[in-house]
Image (cartoon, helix red, strand yellow):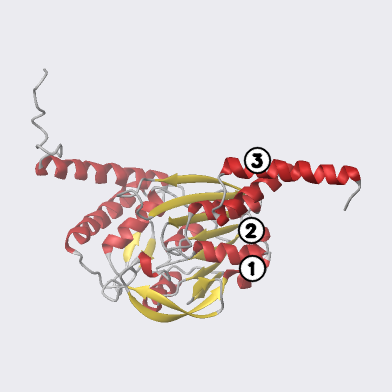
Amino acid sequence: MPGRTNESLDASGIPPFPVRVVLRILTVVKDGMRFAIVNRSHRPQVVRSCLEYWALAVRGKFGERHRNSHDPDRPFHILGMKVHAFSAETLFFLINEIFLEREYAIQLGRPDPFILDCGSNIGVATLFFKRMYPAARIVAFEPDTKTFALLKRNVEANQLTDVSLNNLALSSETGSATFYSDLQRPGSLVMSLVKERTNGVPNAVLCDKLSRFVNAPVDLVKMDIEGAETDVIGEMRASGMLSKVSNVLMEFHHKTGPRQRLSDMLCMLEDASFGYDVQAKFPSGSGNSQDVLLRIYREAVGRPAEEQELRSYRCDSDRRGVESAADASGSYKERRASGQAVAASGIE
């Protein structure tokens, strides 16, 4: 009836606390069942997988509220894996993102792909790729010393083979770089070379170019490097090594630092004949940084030369910030018409 309020909501439109608790419990139960089902090809024991997920969820939700830490010497048991972690909260987030939502699930067309895992953290993505492709050759990168130690431990505890680990940051340069991390929260998911990404403490780490590790055609680059994506992909493109990459799964951190603009990244990808799919949620407020998931693939058929030239010209104009896309298109057509007229007159 008009004017009647919903008694199950408070004045702000938020359900009462008991209702929220019940809804969260139901969500965890449902997610646990879904988790067991989507991973049953690798772990047929569905009931056991559910119980493991629910146990981690309880710990993870408690950690979310109380910021509790976990003894990394005591591994969590998930899908038959031993996973050492600094906190149940962070591990629960990673398990949800990678093994439940399967953000990195991709068909690579061969049983032994070459994968570059950029920003490995404690190695949950590496474990996932090895589940999908047991014969895969993986080169993993993690700059934080403590987190790298746990990454190494997880690789060894699960007896992963053909996995090469590198304790360094990826950059457009080789040498050392300033890396920002929270000393109170080892294994944090927002450690970064970009100061604006985190309020962490600066410390020096080794850094290198990703192109130096491309010694064969790369089936997949997984990239989650907290704001350094533009520099790394730009260096890969400049070195010519980006042409050896078939697929990229990237978490792009839009507006994290002055050089992190999604438009620049998409222009570089289009110039290199990549297509892409985009997944994102609006940030908490207009103008804030935003995490964008990009599924990037090599386009099977190249674009017509004229279309490719127009795209490149638009991207160059956008980077200069002097023309809109429409202006770029008009300027391009004028230049092209002028060039054709000159060619027809025989004047060089």
- Whether pointer 2 and pointer 1 mark residues with C-beta atoms closer than 8 Å, the reply is yes
Q: Quadrant of residue 19?
A: top left
Eyeballing the image, is 105 above or below 170?
above
Number of residues whose C-alpha sits closer than 10 Å to that of mark 1, classed few (under 14), some (14–19) or many (20 or more): some
Location of residue 295 in the rendering, given as x and y in whole percent from the top left corner: 52, 49
Q: Which residue is mark 1?
A: 214
How many marks the image carries: the answer is: 3
Q: Earlier in the sequence, mark 2 or mark 1?
A: 1
Q: Earlier in the sequence, mark 3 or mark 1?
A: 1
| Residue 305 visible somewhere in the drawing | no
Q: CA distance from mark 3 to mark 1?
A: 39 Å
Marker disc for residue 4: none
Amino acid type at image mark 3 = Gly
Q: CA distance from mark 2 to mark 1?
A: 9 Å
Q: Residue at x 52, y 62 (%)?
A: 230
Q: Residue at x 38, y 81 (%)?
A: 203
Of all residues, the one furthest to the top in this rendering is: 1
Q: Which residue is mark 3?
A: 330
Location of residue 275 in the rendering, given as x and y in whole percent from the top left corner: 60, 46
Q: Earlier in the sequence, mark 2 or mark 3?
A: 2
Amino acid type at image mark 2 = Val
Marker disc for residue 245: 2
Q: CA distance from mark 2 to mark 3?
A: 33 Å
